[in-house]
Amino acid sequence: MTTRIRPSEVTYGPAAIVAAKPILPKSRSTITLTEAQRAIMARSAADRNEQVESAIAEVYRFAESKAQYLSETCGHKSDYYLRLIFSGGVSLQKKRKPNAYNAWSHQLAKEKNGDADPGKATNLLDLQRQHREEYDKLTPQEKRDLCEALEEERDSRMFGIRVNQKGRAQDVMNTFRHIMEMCRCGIEAFIGLVRNNTEFELRPQWFFTSTPINRYLTGAIKKWDVEVIGSQFEAFSIAGCELFTFLRTVRDQAEWLKNEIRAKMNTLYADATGKKDTTMHYKDYEKVVVIDEGLTLEGWTHEVFACPSSLLTTIEPLKKLR
């Protein structure tokens, strides 16, 4: 089965940049201070810095105590909650709460331009000027209701079910951006992301925290190519991550099924005996398994009991046994 090579999008983490020092205009001469004035300013600055450091240390202590409490009550290590606490500020800055005027303007535009033909919608500034008196007559409760309605609409856009292709692709890319941000915490990593169905269009996405990682892997791993790997990964994912569908001949399918059966039997036998690296006995099953170990095999569906590699290559009995 040949896989069509699809172009991938590769993102790299930020590289260190050394910027040249710009040529600055000549600065004005400063007023000469006396020794006493310098001492007063130095003491004032030291007191201010000490006050700031004390406040920040108090915040750290509070965060550490909360992280320890969450670790004891909800699981995970305290470091996990510390990262959530201190990275949450970024999302809080990005998410700005709507004010009453913006919420009213949004609702006004929906009412007046909701049924307008493309290119025929009234300008928002004109609508605001024409209906300003309506806003001034709103009660505080009505303003709060408008703000809550706008917040609910925003949340529905962010967390609601995306039914069209563009919306689903946006969901995936928003998630991928969050993953990339989480990786910027003092580690090196690379991530490959592909779609698992054909209901929307999305190129395979790659992220490397550092550019040299991809260059190193290109030389260290034979035939390393993100475009080829991304295309093959996508095809495998769309096929349901089922390796069986990629095997071309009956013989290959049978061999794969036999390997799966052998691995499963070894795992079950090791679990039953408590011996980590032991393997299932087939020829001396009665002596070793039944008599020595006191175990009885149940659930073997194939008509022949033998080592999986000795079974016939008929697919259906092997699939049933697996």
Image: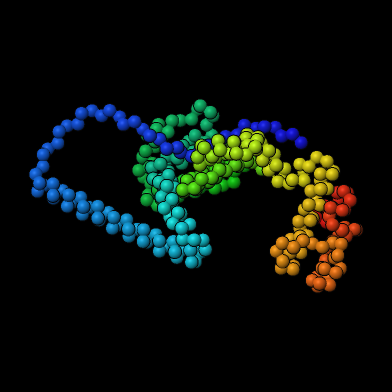
Q: Residue at image x 62%, y 35%? A: 225
Position of 220 compared to 72: left or right?
right
Q: Position of residue 47 (x, y in %)?
A: 21, 54
Q: In this rendered view, identify the residue nearer to me: 231 or 189.
A: 189
Q: In this rendered view, identify the residue nearer to me: 80 or 137.
A: 80
Q: Is residue 178 visible?
A: no
Quarter of the image with the N terminus is: top right
Position of 132 compared to 30: left or right?
right
Quarter of the image with the C terminus is: bottom right
Looking at the picture, the colour scheme in use is rainbow
Q: Relative to 14, does residue 26 appear above or below in the rendering?
A: above
Q: Position of residue 54 (x, y in %)?
A: 28, 58
Q: Relative to 313, does residue 291 appear above or below in the rendering?
A: below
| Residue 283 picture quarter | bottom right
Seen as rendered, the residue at the extreme right is 303
Q: Is residue 46 visible?
A: yes
Q: Position of residue 45 (x, y in %)?
A: 20, 50
Q: In this rendered view, identify the residue nearer to me: 128 or 267.
A: 267
Numbered-mark total: 0
Q: Residue at image x 45%, y 54%? A: 83
| Residue 61 picture quarter | bottom left
Q: Residue at image x 89%, y 51%? A: 312
Q: Residue at image x 31%, y 31%? A: 21
Seen as rendered, the residue at the extreme top is 119
Position of 125 compared to 199: left or right?
left
Q: Position of residue 145 (x, y in %)?
A: 44, 50
Q: In this rendered view, identify the residue nearer to me: 196 or 273.
A: 273
